[in-house]
């Protein structure tokens, strides 16, 4: 493995705010997201601050595939960014995610969007997420969970409204 940037492996001195995006479009997506949220809730060193309502969204990029259910978690964690990434990958493995096709269908996608304003261009973990600022399927649920949120100094709700996929994001009523 490539050498990791020290800020990606350093455990913070105190819990930091992080934004996690969840998505699923294979299998029982609602149950898969429920299991992922519960895993975050039960994980040591992670406290859930907010859980967004779910959004039904059209896929962006990749092959033709079913719509997604997307959700965003706002957490406080004392895990390192890389430790949080590993946790997300274990959840994906538990949901039997297959990574054959870039932006293809998946049982579970766990993306680290923003971790306490850490910036990294490392190929293993880029922060903030390199495409989050243009993806309404992330930004809209994030704005529902944290209406005052900003990304790179711009209100998340404003970024969501400008995103190319903004019209494809729909609130799933009674999503939890």
Image: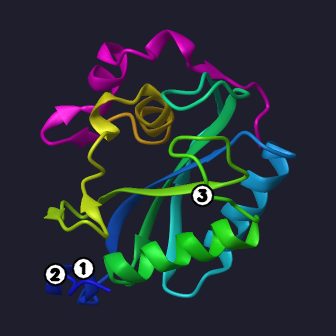
Which colouring convention does the figure follow?
rainbow
Q: Residue at x 61, y 39 (%)?
A: 70
Q: Nearer the viewer, residue 59 or 32?
A: 59
Magenta-colored stretch includes residue 74: no
In the image, residue 136 sits, relative to residue 100, either above or below, namely above
Q: Position of residue 153 (x, y in %)?
A: 12, 39
Q: Residue at x 24, y 39 (%)?
A: 150
Q: Quadrant of residue 67?
A: top right
Pointer 2 and pointer 3: residues touching (CB < 8 Å)? no
* Residue marked by disc 2: 5
Q: Position of residue 57 (x, y in %)?
A: 61, 25
Q: Is residue 133 left or right of residue 145?
A: left
Magenta-colored stretch includes residue 158: yes
**What's the magenta region?**
149-176
Q: Position of residue 62 (x, y in %)?
A: 53, 32
Q: Which mark is residue 8?
A: 1
Q: Residue at x 44, y 73 (%)?
A: 85
Report the residue that reaches farthest toward the front.
100
* Residue marked by disc 3: 99
Pointer 1 and pointer 2: residues touching (CB < 8 Å)? yes
């Amino acid at each position: 493995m490539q050498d990791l940037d020290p800020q990606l492996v350093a455990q913070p001195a105190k819990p930091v705010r992080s934004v996690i995006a969840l998505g699923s479009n294979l299998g029982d997506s609602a149950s898969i997201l429920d299991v992922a949220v519960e895993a975050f809730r039960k994980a040591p060193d992670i406290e859930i601050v907010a859980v967004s309502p779910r959004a039904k969204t059209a896929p962006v990029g990749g092959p033709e595939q079913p719509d997604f259910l997307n959700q965003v978690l706002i957490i406080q964690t004392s895990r390192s960014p890389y430790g949080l990434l590993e946790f997300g990958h274990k959840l994906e493995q538990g949901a039997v995610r297959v990574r054959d096709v870039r932006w293809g269908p998946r049982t579970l996608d766990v993306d680290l969007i923003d971790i306490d304003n850490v910036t990294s261009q490392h190929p293993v973990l880029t922060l903030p997420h390199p495409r989050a600022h243009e993806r309404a399927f992330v930004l809209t649920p994030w704005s529902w969970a944290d209406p005052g949120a900003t990304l790179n100094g711009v209100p998340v709700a404003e970024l969501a409204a400008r995103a190319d996929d903004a019209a494809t994001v729909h609130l799933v009523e009674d999503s939890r």
